[in-house]
Image (tube, helix red, strand yellow):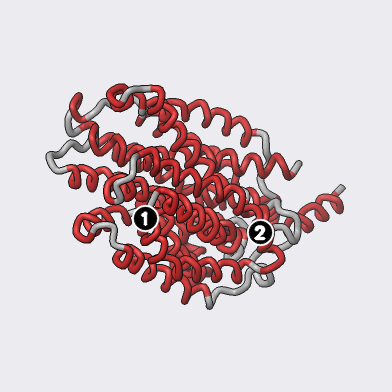
């Protein structure tokens, strides 16, 4: 099967999944806090709205267990088809929801339920997309292939942010609040249909086929993951925590932070986010390719050190002017954090053997995501009390980064030592011998 089609299948579904997930995040501060969580105190309404945003992150470990189980027992492809249906269906229904004014407390209840489904679906999507790429990767290019699904994050966010921004330009503020915000959510059903068609035409990965032919399918993947690879799970959790908090801030809470506490307009905040994501689209595959030669561990540690050193300067620059805000987003999100994220999927997957790789990779990553997803609930009262203080916000980020940096020192250089086998070569040779 052509590698280009495999990569397109991995990134296309990933783009759409993250489009839906971050579309919700963008709408949280702009729409949901008003329509679904009305309050006389705007800060309370915003806090409640971001609580539902965090619920999506909290549900992701559940999805990692469910879809990791399917992915390690039935195949990567089957699991990835199910995640698309779960994400697309819930996003479409969010676009159909009545507001609090129309049906009262039932409205936010349904919103939270659909956000839970979104989180569960995404909990299984990320790991499967990574494996679809890395388990098909030619020898010596696993880092490059593993970086391609990561493009789904900036592409999905840009698509989600652009769709809301585009609709807001075409409608008045009253029209946007009344019905305009619903259009991007409803449109997701079209995108999901396209992704299902693309993924329906691919085969499962050589690594999974080889495990199946050998009869080495895990009976209970989550149990075997902790019994044989528990240390790797905790490595993944710790490595993700530090950059994870910064990620949630730079790609979600920054919209509220910039518009509410820095005094910038909604358009400036969205433009800064778009600049950072556009830069990521360029840097991620370049860094992924370099990791096959320099080593993923070296790049990962360098990225963590730079994030730590630049944390306070970033928050100091952000409030100076829109230009400095744009530069900060481009550097911190588009270059420094992107260097970590480009290598993350590959290095995490290389810590686990094939029979529990989907579960181990997904569960560790999503546990960390569940923790950092509640960052906005911490930052909202912080901002209310201290304002956009560089020392407070930068210090918070530095604490998490320090934990990840220490753990990164004990992780092997997986470019040289990994749990991957040359599954593609072995599998193809085995087929030739049978023929």
Task: In this rendered view, identify the residue nearer to me: 23 or 370.
Answer: 23
Which of the 4 quarters of the picture holds residue 413? Answer: bottom right
SS label for mark 1: loop
Q: CA distance from mark 2 to mark 1?
A: 37 Å
Q: Is residue 284 left or right of residue 3?
A: left
Which residue is pictured at 73% across the width and 45% down the height? 3
- Quarter of the image where the N terminus is located: top right
Q: Is residue 196 left or right of residue 43?
A: right
**Circle 2 is placed at which residue position?**
143
**Circle 1 is placed at which residue position?**
320
Task: In this rendered view, identify the residue nearer to me: 149 or 421.
Answer: 149
SS label for mark 2: helix
Question: Does label 2 or label 1 sit earlier along the sequence?
Answer: 2
Give the percent coordinates (x, y) of residue 14: 54, 43
Q: Is residue 412 left or right of residue 263?
A: right
Which residue is pictured at 30% across the width and 53% down the height? 376
Give the percent coordinates (x, y) of residue 92: 41, 29
Assess disc 2: are there few (<14), some (14-19) or many (≥20) residues with their C-alpha within 10 Å of its C-alpha. many
Q: Of discs 2 and 1, which sits in the foreground? A: 1
Task: In this rendered view, identify the residue nearer to me: 216 or 11.
Answer: 11
Which residue is pictured at 60% across the width and 74% down the height? 412
Which residue is pictured at 81% across the width and 50% down the height? 431
Give the percent coordinates (x, y) of residue 157: 47, 42
Give the percent coordinates (x, y) of residue 283: 61, 53
Assess disc 1: are there few (<14), some (14-19) or many (≥20) residues with their C-alpha within 10 Å of its C-alpha. few
């Amino acid at each position: 099967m052509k590698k280009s089609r495999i990569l397109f299948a991995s990134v296309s579904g990933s783009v759409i999944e993250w489009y839906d997930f971050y579309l919700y995040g963008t709408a949280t501060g702009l729409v949901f806090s008003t329509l679904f969580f009305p309050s006389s105190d705007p800060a309370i309404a915003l806090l409640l709205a971001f609580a539902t945003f965090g619920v999506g992150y909290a549900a992701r470990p559940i999805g990692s267990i469910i879809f990791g189980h399917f992915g390690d027992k039935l195949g990567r492809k089957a699991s990835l088809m199910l995640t698309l249906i779960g994400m697309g269906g819930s996003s479409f229904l969010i676009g159909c929801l009545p507001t609090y004014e129309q049906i009262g407390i039932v409205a936010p209840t349904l919103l939270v339920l659909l956000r839970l489904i979104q989180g569960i679906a995404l909990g299984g999507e990320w790991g499967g997309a990574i494996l679809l790429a890395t388990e098909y990767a030619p020898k010596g290019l696993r880092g490059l292939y593993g970086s391609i699904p990561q493009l789904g994050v900036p592409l999905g966010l840009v698509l989600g942010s652009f769709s809301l921004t585009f609709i807001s330009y075409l409608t008045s503020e009253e029209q946007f609040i009344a019905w305009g915000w619903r259009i991007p959510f409803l449109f997701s059903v079209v995108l999901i249909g396209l992704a299902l068609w693309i993924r329906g035409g691919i085969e499962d990965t050589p690594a999974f086929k080889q495990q199946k032919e050998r009869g080495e399918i895990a009976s209970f993947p989550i149990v075997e993951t902790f019994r044989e690879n528990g240390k790797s799970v905790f490595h993944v959790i710790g490595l993700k925590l530090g950059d994870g908090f910064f990620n949630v801030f730079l790609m979600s809470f920054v919209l509220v932070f910039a518009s509410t506490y820095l005094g910038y307009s909604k358009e400036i905040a969205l433009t800064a986010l778009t600049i950072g994501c556009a830069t990521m689209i360029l840097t991620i595959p370049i860094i992924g390719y370099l990791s096959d030669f320099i080593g993923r561990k070296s790049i990962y540690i360098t990225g963590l050190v730079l994030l730590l050193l630049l944390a306070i300067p970033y928050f100091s620059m952000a409030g100076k002017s829109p230009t400095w805000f744009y530069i900060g987003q481009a550097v911190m999100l588009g270059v420094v954090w992107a260097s970590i994220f480009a290598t993350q999927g590959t290095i995490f997957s290389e810590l686990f053997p094939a029979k529990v790789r989907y579960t181990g990779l997904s569960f560790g990553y999503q546990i960390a995501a569940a923790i950092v997803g509640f960052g906005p609930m911490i930052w909202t009262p912080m901002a209310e009390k201290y304002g956009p203080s560089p020392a407070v916000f930068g210090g918070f980020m530095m604490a998490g980064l320090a934990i990840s940096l220490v753990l990164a020192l004990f992780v092997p250089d997986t470019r040289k030592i990994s749990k991957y086998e040359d599954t593609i070569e072995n599998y193809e040779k085995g087929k030739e011998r049978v023929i």
